[in-house]
Amino acid sequence: MDNLDLVRLQEELSAQGILMSFSGPFSHSIIEELGVAVKNYLESAQVARPALMDVFAVYIEQAQNVRNYIDRREQGPEQARLSHSGIVVVARKDGRYVVSSGNLVDRVDAPSLVAHLERLRALDKAGLKALYKQRMREPLSDRSGAGLGLIDMARKAAEPLDYGLSAVDEQYMFFSLRVMI
Amino acid sequence: MDNLTIEATRSSPAIRFDAENRRLSIQGESYPENAAAFYGPVFAWLKAFLGGLEPAASVRVDLEVLYLNSSSTKVMLNFLDLLDQAAQAGTRIVVNWYYDPDNEAVLECGQDFGEELQSLSFVLVETPREST
């Protein structure tokens, strides 16, 4: 990549208010390092502690959801393709923080994910708390591991969870999630 | 019974369980790569400890947790449930849940747990502000 491309990339990141982004295979240590970087950045920007911790928490849940989804699949070329599809972004837009993430998902997993998200979008704070309490008691090994994390994000979000699914090929769709804090 | 001591890492809390003095403490942030694996030894110790207590013994638990991810939240609830069962069976258990008034999420998390517990004494304790 020559310098010109880097300048353009920086302009694009800046225009979109992107403070931090990571695209590619996530390891646990990358998740930790970027989490610390996000926290330090928000501290130096003198962001109030509750907002800072909410941004950090939502970032951790999203990054771990992406990683866990990919980790559950059998190793091989397909898993490598999936792990390269992961992205997480922390941005500032219109005075709010926005934490987004995306990754390829198998088409067979899409309907239950959409159903879960639509259910959360329809609930108010009290309803989200009740569902959270119920899910909190489900065993850790449950395959729908992302369940409690999504409810937690919805409880912290200023607006209902925003998501998108776009077709990629016969087997996969690209799932993206956007949480406004 | 041996004490259990696990040093904190960036994503896992310090565990200091003192069997003789019956004082258990968990301090730090919890978002380990694999919560079940990290907390496995913690549960094994707790079960052995509770099983070996004299009737009506008293136990103090100090939880100063700055952040719990969703899987650590499930684990923490299981941990508190075990203590609650022991309290129901006659052990006197006090759990102090410390929170910084500037970190609302920790207070809310403590309130969520408090509502799930029946027999042990669960106390929300405000700590001095971290930032002035």
Image (cartoon, helix red, strand yellow):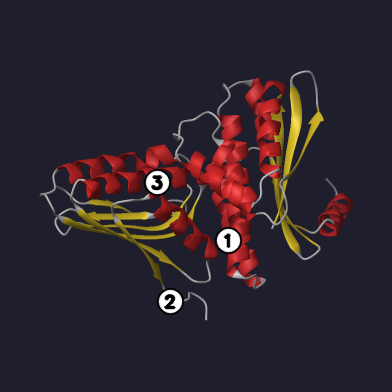
Image vertical order of residue A158 relative to residue A167, above or below = below
Query: Which is closer to the viewer, label 3 or label 1?
Result: 3
Q: Percent x, y for residue B132?
A: 52, 81
Residue A81: in sight, yes or no? no
Residue closer to the observer: B67 or A7: B67
Count of marks overlaid on the render? 3
Q: Residue furthest left?
A: B54
Find numbered disc 2 in the image and state the secondary structure of the residue it sits on.
loop
Within the image, what quadrant is residue A65 found in?
top right
Q: Percent x, y for residue B10?
A: 46, 55
Q: Amino acid type of disc 2?
A: Pro
Q: Which residue is mark 2?
A: B128
Q: Disc number at residue A53?
A: 1
Q: Residue at position x 58%, y 37% from top?
A: A146
Seen in the image, is B97 located left or right of residue A150?
left
Q: CA distance from mark 3 to mark 1?
A: 21 Å
Residue closer to the observer: B99 or A102: B99
Local packing at callout 1 (Cα closer than 10 Å; few below 14, some 14-19, many 20+) is many
Q: Amino acid type of disc 3?
A: Leu
Residue closer to the observer: A78 or A176: A176
